[in-house]
Amino acid sequence: MSIERVDAVVVGAGFTGLSAAQELSRAGRSFVVLEARDRVGGRVEARANGLGEAIDTGGQFLCEDMPELMALVQARGKTLVEAHVDGEFITQPPLPGDEAERTYLGAMAIRERMNGIEPHDPAIAGMTVAAWLERQVDPADAKAGFRSMIEGLWCQALEKIPLWHLIDNDRRITNEQSELQYFLAETMQSLADDLARDLGGRLRLNSAVMGIEHAPGGVRVVAGGRVFEARSVLVAVPPMMASKLVFSPPLPDRLSRALGVWHSGVVIKILVRYARAFWRDRGLSGMVMWRSLPGLFACDVSKDEVHPALVVFIGGPLALRWGGLDDAALRTEVMSRLVAAIGPEAGEVLDFSFRSWIDDAWSGGAYSDLILDVHATDAEDVLLAGAPPVHFASSELSPSFPGYIEGAIVAGRIGGRKVLADLQETT
């Protein structure tokens, strides 16, 4: 195998890896970014639907309270599309308007109460979110709304999520505007593509990393039939995927255990295209939450009057149940529920496209990895410390907006600066 020598190797070309690469580039360091896929973006992705239109099949939304992502959008000249939220919000099974609002407010009150608990309070040690929720005295509808909200956001069953971990994550998600405020007319993938173009030949696609070895003066990374010798490496992939890499010698036990407690969320994302936004004519927002099917949610993602569309998210345990269906059966499950919620016109579709993020080959799943070991309270700190010259970065480890594109950008910049500090010390 041929050998290429660089200052640093970045493993993964999602927004974390791309943001780290920006830091290294600005500092004038030599580096390569190794990406297993034939594209950049990671859990951000765009594909053509059946009408030939580019649609976001991965991460899509942002809001004005995400400063780093908003700055990138502006700098790269992207077009913000404001999500349509005017009109009635529908719950399924149906609730009268006043009762639906009380249920939503009740679910939010549960979330606020949860976030008032200190993550490391001994009283919640070893407790899952489901166990804590069972102890609450709120109305059943409010508790069902809370479950649907959390399982939809984090794509895991409440019975698996440690309470302390959810609190810690929720506290770092500080937006006051809805995270569904905007999306990009050009797709979020186009923003990742813009960042990738800046890298030129320093980006290597179709280069799955086979192993990371310690070597004199740094590390040796094997990928794409080549060997890269570097003084430092940043593993910029989700923790669960990082746990699958082969390290030689093996990582310290504590670090290996910290990688092993993360598990990816499971989600299926569906885009349904229509000839017109008929729901708006009826005073509906297009938002639907199924209380009886936690993790099922729909909203309006029409780019303009010419491209009316609803996106449907299926997350958590429901995604696992429906993920085993064939394409026709999945469409039947989804469309029957849309018709029941917003009327027979919902069945008059121009296109039905979906992307399953269950057991994705190079990201594990979506939208984020979560710690599913109630006792692994130090796992994140251990990963952040890494084992220099081997460092880890991902949206999950971000001090702000973990699990979001904003978090990936922040984490990537922090990871890039850690690598630069490594290089400075060894100069």
Image: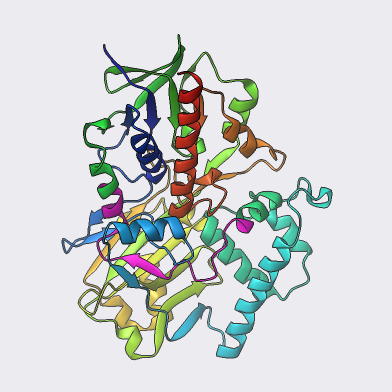
Question: In the rendered view, does 409 fall on the left or right side of 135?
Answer: left
The spot of residue 234 in percent (x, y) is 45, 30
Tell me if residue 243 can be seen: no
Picture mark count: 0
- Quadrant location of the N terminus in the rendered image: top left
Residue at 42%, 84% in the rendered image: 86
Residue 403 drawn at (x, y percent): 50, 51
- From which residue to which does the magenta span run? 170-193
Percent of width and height locating residue 196: 27, 43
Towards the viewer: 306 or 72:
72
Residue 334 in the figure: left or right of residue 105: left
**Residue 176 visible in the current orientation:** yes
**Depicted 389 relative to depicted 70: above or below:** above
Q: Residue 60: name its quadrant.
A: bottom left
Residue at position x 53%, y 83% in the image: 94
In-image side of 201 versus 129 (left or right): left
Residue most extreme to the top:
216
Q: Is 304 included in the stretch rendered in magenta?
A: no
* Display coloring: rainbow
What quarter of the picture does the C terminus occupy? top left
Image point (55%, 89%), residue name: 97
- Which of 243 and 406 lies nearest the eye of the viewer? 406
